[in-house]
Image: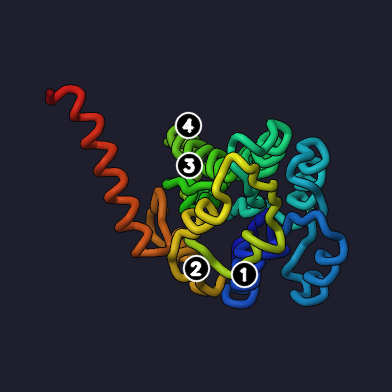
Amino acid sequence: MNTWVVSGCSSGLGRCWTHSIITDRQDTVIGITRSKEVAEEMVNAYQGHFVPCVADVQDSKDLTEKLISAVRTVGTPSRVVTAAGYAQFGTLEDVSNEQIRAQFTTNVEGCLNVIRPLLPFMREMDSSRILLVSSMSGVACWPLLGAYQISKYAIEAISDTLRQELQGSSIQVGCIEPGPHKTGWASTYARRHEISANYNASELMKRASCGYNIEDPTASLPYFWKMFDSPVMPQRIATSREFVEFAVEEAQQKIRDWRAVFDD
């Protein structure tokens, strides 16, 4: 039996994964959500397997106090998943610094605000794992998603840096790069800034649509569980083979560009 901490547990992939952790593995989840109503609903639904931590991941002081209180009540988590985040749409010319900062504060600082207070507890365990939730947008870029992509590229850097810094400890670090899923990330939970007249809005919106199949959140579960069930936690895993082929070609083009300077 494992104890988990999952941020963003109330919706999207975080909700899907929380449900699977509890119903498929009968583990306990300390779930971070801003909504008292959803927290109460999940407490009632999961009958003793869900411990709410009602806090905003942007508020490091409040989150730290509530997380430590929950850990001391339930026990040290051996599994941590940072799924909280949202998407800000708009061109980099149009979105404000305040909007970019808000995107970064939630998606990036919020991730670190979850992890930092838990590390002292996790070091005491024989084995523990941290899964950072990136995106296809942490590997490749499309128009109108600049603020979001900046934040997800940062998550990739956090994952790689944290893995190196925790080398030799009992804590393994991995990163999952989900493709598009029916989670409301681009609709219900997204924030949008109007595209200015400097741009052909319809053309940008067309190019921003990556063209990949939009999967049900449950389609991510085999990849999610591979991160925790593999003897050694994979450093990263994507949830779309089609995207992987695209990303590999993008990476190979970067290699060609780098080498071209020195091969001339």
Give the residue at x 63% y 49%: 89
The residue identified by callout 3 is 156
Q: Amino acid at mark 4?
A: Glu
Give the residue at x 50% y 54%: 203
Work out whether mark 2 precedes mark 3 in sequence or the reverse, and give the earlier one: 3
Image position, residue 50 (x, y; %)? 74, 66
The residue identified by callout 1 is 16
Disc 4 versus disc 3: nearer the observer: 3
The residue identified by callout 4 is 165
Asked if the residue at tag 4 contacts the one at tag 2, i.e. Cβ–Cβ closer than 8 Å, the answer is no
Element carrying mark 4: helix
258 relative position to 38: left or right: left
Asked if the residue at tag 1 contacts the one at tag 2, i.e. Cβ–Cβ closer than 8 Å, the answer is yes
Work out whether mark 2 precedes mark 4 in sequence or the reverse, and give the earlier one: 4
Disc 2 versus disc 4: nearer the observer: 2
Within-10-Å neighbours for mark 1: few <14, some 14–19, many 20+: some
The residue identified by callout 2 is 220
Give the residue at x 43% y 66%: 212
